[in-house]
Image (cartoon, rainbow, N blue to C red):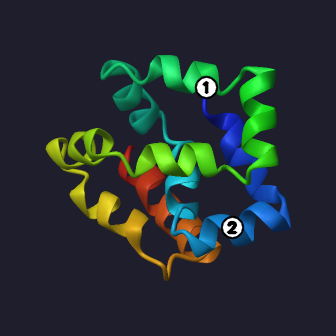
Amino acid sequence: MGCLLIVLTLKSAHYTDLLSTHGMSTHCTHLKSTHYTSLLSTHGMSTHCTHLKSTHYTDLLSTHGMSTHCTHLKSTHYTDLLSTHGMSTHCTHLKSTHCTLLEAYSLYSLEVYSLY
């Protein structure tokens, strides 16, 4: 999982609070899904996910509280990608300011079971 580094940062209280505030915890948890990772790779996002492994980029995310990644998710192109592939509900949830880490893990559990 190229994006596993982002998911792991959820263990930090600082990141958890930041992600929850911006409604990003669901997305970061969802990156654990093989199905979603494949979707990203298929649509030219593999370079972005691989880039997250870079020490320089990882340090940038840590220093700026993942603002770089969060900004990227707000791009129109990415929003359209999610909507096109029937993920508009997930995309809408990303914009929710009421997304909590607990909700994120609950949603992820349901998604994992739905893959089998």
Residue placed most toward the observer, 73 or 105: 73
Q: Do the residues labelled 1 and 2 touch (CB within 8 Å)?
A: no
Percent coordinates x, y for residue 25 in the rendering:
58, 62
What kind of element bears circle 2?
helix
Q: Give the crowd class for mark 2: few <14, some 14-19, many >=20 residues within 10 Å.
A: some
Point out the image quarter for the C terminus: top left
Point out the image quarter for the N terminus: top right
Q: Which amino acid does label 2 sit on?
A: Leu
Percent coordinates x, y for residue 97 in the rendering:
48, 79
Residue placed most toward the observer, 66 or 115: 66
**With 35 as the anchor, is 68 left or right in this view?**
right
Cα–Cα span, label 1 and label 2: 21 Å
Q: What residue type is labelled 1?
A: Gly
Of mark 1 and mark 2, the one earlier in the sequence is 1
Percent coordinates x, y for residue 37 in the rendering:
46, 31
Percent coordinates x, y for residue 112 in the rendering:
47, 50
Q: Which mark is residue 25?
A: none
Q: Residue at horizontal 44%, vertical 62%?
A: 110
- Residue matched to label 1: 2
User: In which image quadrant can residue 106 be found?
Assistant: bottom right
Q: Residue at horizontal 21%, vertical 44%?
A: 80
**Residue farthest to the bottom, as pictured:** 98
**With 103 as the anchor, is 58 left or right in this view?**
right
Q: Residue at horizontal 62%, vertical 75%?
A: 102
**With 1 as the anchor, is 42 left or right in this view?**
left
> Is residue 79 placed above or below 56 in the rendered structure?
below
What kind of element bears circle 1?
loop
Q: Residue at horizontal 36%, vertical 52%?
A: 114
- Residue matched to label 2: 18
> Is residue 39 placed above or below 72 in the rendered structure?
above
